[in-house]
Image: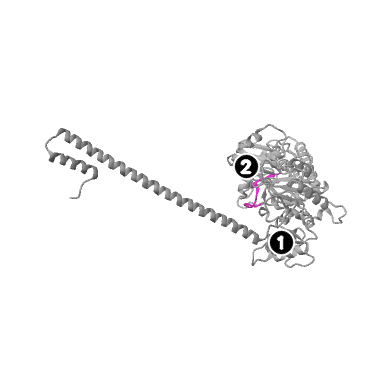
Amino acid sequence: MSLAEAPSPSPSSSSGSDDFAALLDSELEFASGADSAFPGDPSSAFPGTDDEDEDEDPEEPEAEAIEQNGTKRRRVEEQRQDQGTSVRHDKIPTGASKNVQVEACPHPGYFGGLCFRCGKPQDEENVSGVAFGYIHKGLRLGTSEIDRLRGADLKNLLRERKLVLILDLDHTLINSTKLQDISSAEKDLGIQTAASKDDPNRSIFSLDSMQMLTKLRPFVREFLKEASNMFEMYIYTMGDKAYAIEIAKLLDPSNIYFPSKVISNSDCTQRHQKGLDVILGAESVAVILDDTEYVWQKHKENLILMERYHFFASSCRQFGFGFRSLSESMQDERESDGALATVLDVLKRIHASFFDMAVETDLSSRDVRQVIKAVRKEILQGCKIVFSRVFPNNTRPQEQMFWKMAEYLGAVCSTDVDSSVTHVVTLDLGTEKARWGVDNKKFLVHPRWIEAANFRWHRQPEEDFPVTAPKEKSREKDNAVAGKKETSKDKENSAAGQKETMKDNEENAAAGQKETMKDKEENAVAGQKETRSAERNVAGQEKDDAKENAVATSATGPTDS
């Protein structure tokens, strides 16, 4: 069975998945050859039972079969010896011996539902192992085979002085938006037009088949180029496979960095969680870059948390931010000191520390998680922090996020002030501890100072994170604003009263004018009839009076009976 359809690995790649692809070819070819020395001839499976060809010399085809099997066996043996294992010659049948004891197949993995060692179908009721569909469709490996491949991969990586780097996509390397979610300001600025330009240096792209726009984070191409010299890299996204592959093409058009290493949500073994169980690399050498911590519940020690990249307006809305996006402001992160440039420096420090030749520990027993922890603790080393009005009342400060974060970064946290305190972290200059800090010339910083150090992996300038004015002044401002609002409200009520009075006057005047005009019209009609009645002199005075009464009745309505 050929696996030629798999993406060819990069010459510089030492991936266990790439080695496995080559090994799997050999295993499958060897297995098919061992099962049938003469393809297409059913009788070959039972040598010595064919009575029709007794005159033929069976030694020649048998020798040919032995030679073929020996060649294939050597190929598999060479592959396995290169990965630290060997094939037991005494367990492989040679020739046509009838009493050969064949070792039971351990079923190291399945390809298309069949064991790639013995060809036995997989038990549908007892599906074991982990699916690696992103390497080969239909591939599933057992625990022992995964461990073996990881061990082989670890040897190759350490020999080439490389670690494993797992990269998230959205808000880490890129930012994407649906066309229907583009804001009016972005449309006016011609975002879609810019994405459609045939410019090799552009950083914004249109994914027409998905009705989306994607913006590459500044410095991403240089980041991938430099990181590939230190790491074997994987893409790992919670997005769909089709989306992940399209983004991989934008980031790696030559398929140099991520051959057979694009993992999507369909490859996850746990819902809404990412895991290293689908990575053919040892956890002890795996570094993760992601903007979301909770999806890595089992591997937080491997994680470097990234500052989220919000380029499009829809991204800001998604996370509840009310400010203008980078696209609407016609701005972007700087390549020189943006998030990716910053984390690249961190990765270089981690890599250098892991492979430090001055360390006496053997490379194979080193753990990158301990290196990450040590590098992180250097960030606020030497700082002693007191918090003031940062945490809710009736809570243990030691359990709060900023307290834990400061300790992760190497700071010492305390609930009491003393001469060894270096920083007072507060939201209010008017607290007792804040005033003590001012009197004793200590740093007073906003809690965001700790958060920024966590993202930037460097102690940040304290003057960039000042504390706001005391709450008393804020209350005075609030009262002043409330007073202004009350005065404005009174003015509005006064104006409304004036409008109501004017409206009543206008309505009364109009009603009076209508009544006067009505009276005049009735008098005119009555006068005209009286004139005509007098001129005609018809039927006497009684008839004239009757007509007047009739006219008056029709004008004023019926009288009470």
Of tags 1 and 2, the one toward the viewer is 1
Gap in Å between the C-alphas at discs 1 and 2?
35 Å
Inspect the magenta stretch and tell me whether residue 229 lies in it: no
Numbered range of the magenta stretch: 261-273
Using the image as rendered, state which of residue 156 and residue 12 is in the foreground. Answer: 12
Inspect the magenta stretch and tell me whether residue 264 lies in it: yes
Task: Find residue 22 and report its horizontal and vertical position in percent.
Answer: 75, 41
Q: Going by the picture, which residue comes out furthest to the top?
A: 198
Residue 316 to residue 435: above or below: above
Q: Going by the picture, which residue comes out furthest to the left?
A: 539
506 to the left or right of 109:
left
Instruction: Answer yes or no: is residue 13 visible.
Output: yes
Q: Mark 1 points at which residue?
A: 403
Using the image as rendered, state which of residue 99 and residue 234 is in the foreground. Answer: 234
Answer few, some or many: residues within 10 Å of disc 2's Cα (few below 14, many 20 plus, some between 14 and 19): some
217 to the left or right of 555:
right
Task: Find residue 40 and report its horizontal and vertical position in percent.
Answer: 68, 36
Instruction: Answer yes or no: is residue 303 visible.
Output: no
Q: Name the residue under label 2.
A: 177
Q: Are marks 1 and 2 in contact (CB under 8 Å)?
A: no
Q: Which amino acid does label 2 sit on?
A: Thr
